[in-house]
Image (cartoon, grey):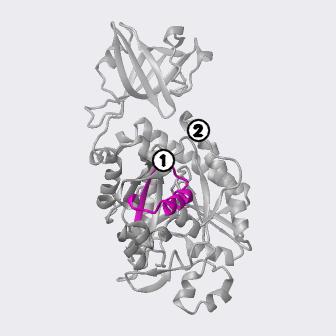
Amino acid sequence: MHAYRTHTCGELRKSHVGETVKLSGWLHRRRDHGGVMFIDLRDHYGLTQVVFNPGSPGFGTVERLRAESVITLEGKVVARDESLVNPNLATGEIEVVAGEVSVQSEAAELPLPVFGEPEYPEDIRLKHRYLDLRRETLHKNMVLRSQVIASLRRRMIEQGFTEYQTPILTASSPEGARDFLVPSRLHPGEFYALPQAPQQFKQLLMVSGFDRYFQIAPCFRDEDARADRSPGEFYQLDIEMSFVTQEDVFSAIEPVMAGVFSEFADWEGKGRTVPEGAFPRIPYAEAMAKYGSDKPDLRNPIELADVSEFFEDDSKTGFGIFAKIIAGGGRVIAIPAPKAAAEKSRKFFDELDKWAKKEMQAPGLGYARLKEADGGGVDSQDPVLKNFEPALLATLLEKLGLSAGDGIFFSAGKKGEAYKLAGAARTKVGEELGLIEEGVFRLCWIVDFPMYEYDEDNKKVDFSHNPFSMPQGGMDALLEADTEEKQLDLKAYQYDIVCNGVE
């Protein structure tokens, strides 16, 4: 018999009943039922319930051990009574009646419990990371990450890509963030830069004749933490292709992404799905106009609308604030809130206004609650729409597809600022009203990004993403863009995949 185990803690089934087995693992938890000792023994693969009867050789040893002690035990597999079967456990039909036990590593008092996963401060979790990683959720996340990477590799190879590793110590190149620098021992005063992305190396591979490259690439960026990215370093699926069009890229990558999401959508039985068919393709300008974001969450049905034309003449609206903003070159963007007036109190609308001021550092959100008018039709007693001419109000509501019982929020200001607030408000309103579709991954392409954008801080036109992109129209279009206005109109062959609002 093997020195440590004949089976893992997630392996035993009813077919093993009657066998003598040896298991090794961590003492996950212990329970004393009328003198009979039950423990859950845990390893990488799962849990097995082990029974120690009074007088058995290992009873006294297990009785004194703390949780997370590492033990090896030998015992016989028996079937559980049908009333005691645990359907939530892969090994739930059996238990092991143990005899001998040997202690591999006895645990001291734990600074961080593993069983139950109670919330603990991050500094304690990081200090005792080896305990934190034993917890079920983190352990499963690590396994999921490994399986996703393996799936990506397999699918990329099926699409004709070859994996190459590129250097980590390199020279600095413009990528949009600060570099991490490593001093050179052989060249005092000189530094290597850790790559923000393998951009130049993968292009070197292409001009060297390697056709389709991919890499699960480490990227190092000296930037603040993001909600969806670790500070300092992260990994990305990095690709490059030769002699291809934008359509070729989409055709190669869509099956990979759709396949990976479909494979893991139902991870842990959560019942999530991925819609079939090609990913929707949304031009950047359309995404900003409809969703106020270049990474829209398509589970949210709310679409924004530019309603500036309705507020230009304050003699018809009785609301001069928006008219002044429009006269100064600003825009007014409407965020529909279906059923909000019928289902929410005024406090809901006021809280959204406070949120805009506090969280978004904006002047605020205008709003209007729609109700049935006394003489028929729809009106509102809130200041933004209270004095609207009836015909103009009817046209506005028709454009927005709204009626009595609905609500509207308004974001007004400079175009970029108005859309930024409107996009964030769209997400907030969708969440607050429970409009976000659950149990689905909605992927899309955002295409036709602008090649350039105006840098307000430095008062100049600069690349919107990075210079490693082809302008639509090729070099001719680039050379003809000899004014700032023409440069800002130039689009690039740049595109992002977005899933549920995450790039």
Residue 414 falls in which quadrant of the image? Answer: bottom left
Q: Residue at x 65, y 51 (%)?
A: 258
Does the image show residue 354? yes
Tag on residue 491?
Answer: none
Q: Position of residue 306 (x, y in %)?
A: 50, 66
Q: Residue at x 52, y 69 (%)?
A: 197
Q: Report whether 74 appears left or right of 182.
A: right
Which badge, 2 or 1, is on the more N-terminal residue?
2
Q: Is residue 241 magenta?
A: no
Q: Position of residue 117 (x, y in %)?
A: 36, 34
Amino acid marked by disc 1: Ala
Tag on residue 266?
Answer: 2
Crowding at mark 2 (Cα within 10 Å: few <14, some 14-19, many 20+): some
Q: Which residue is mark 1?
A: 404
The span picked out in magenta is: 386-411
Q: Residue at x 46, y 19 (%)?
A: 49
Q: Position of residue 282 (x, y in %)?
A: 62, 63
Q: Secondary structure at mark 1?
A: loop
Q: Report whether 92 appears left or right of 473.
A: left
